[in-house]
Image: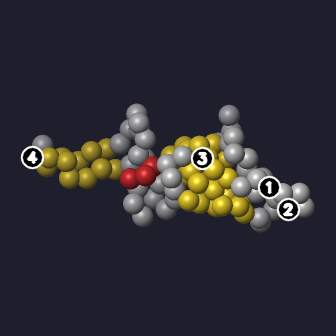
Amino acid sequence: MDPTPYLQENMTVKLSLHDMNPVAITMPQRATLEWWKTEPVTKGQTASSSYKPAILSNGVRTSCRRMVRREHGIVVMIEDGFLRRARKD
């Protein structure tokens, strides 16, 4: 999986150099993102084991639990794009 979409402004990364030339970048394990677009939950849908499509602020498409609302932020594992949890502010 390409981690590039998860690169954010002011994110701390590790840059490996060889003869002052960048050769590798190590990203953090998690990124906190915002929802860009989700479908609304319709009456009668259950929250348990029910998912809806969502597009994150970085353009990545994913699925989220129906009970997560658009105003919630999420924490994503960068390595596999797995939705770890909704951010609690």
Q: Residue at x 52, y 56 (%)?
A: 60
Give me the C-alpha separation between circle 1 and circle 2. 7 Å
| Amino acid at pointer 4 | Asp
**Mark 1, secondary structure of its residue:** loop
The numbered mark, 1 or 4, whose residue comes first in the sequence reads 4
Q: Is residue 54 left or right of residue 24?
A: right
Q: Find the distance from the CA under tag 1 to the CA under tag 4.
A: 54 Å
- Residue at the spot 34% in from the left edge and 50% down from the top edge: 26
Is residue 73 found left or right of 58 in the rendered image?
Answer: right
Give x and y (percent) for residue 88.
68, 39
Q: How many marks?
A: 4
Give the foreground label among 2 and 3. Answer: 3
Left or right of residue 39: residue 78: left
Q: Which mark is residue 45?
A: 2
Task: Measure the C-alpha gap from mark 4 to mark 3.
Answer: 40 Å
Comparing labels 1 and 4, the label whose residue is closer to the camera: 1
Q: Label 2: how many residues lie within 10 Å, few (<14), some (14-19) or many (20+)?
A: few
Instruction: Report if residue 55 is visible in the image.
Output: yes
User: Which residue is under mark 4?
Assistant: 19
Q: Secondary structure at mark 3?
A: strand
Task: Determine the image quadrant of residue 54.
Answer: bottom right
Q: Decide: marks 1, 2 in contact (CB < 8 A)?
A: yes
Q: Quadrant of residue 53?
A: bottom right
Residue carrying label 1: 41
How far apart, in angstroms, are the residues tagged by discs 2 and 3?
22 Å
Number of other residues with Cα within 10 Å of mark 4, as a class: few under 14, some 14 to 19, many 20 or more: few
Is residue 22 positioned above or below 63 on the image? above
Quadrant into which the N terminus falls: bottom left
Q: Are marks 1 and 4 in contact (CB under 8 Å)?
A: no
Residue at which label 3 appears: 36
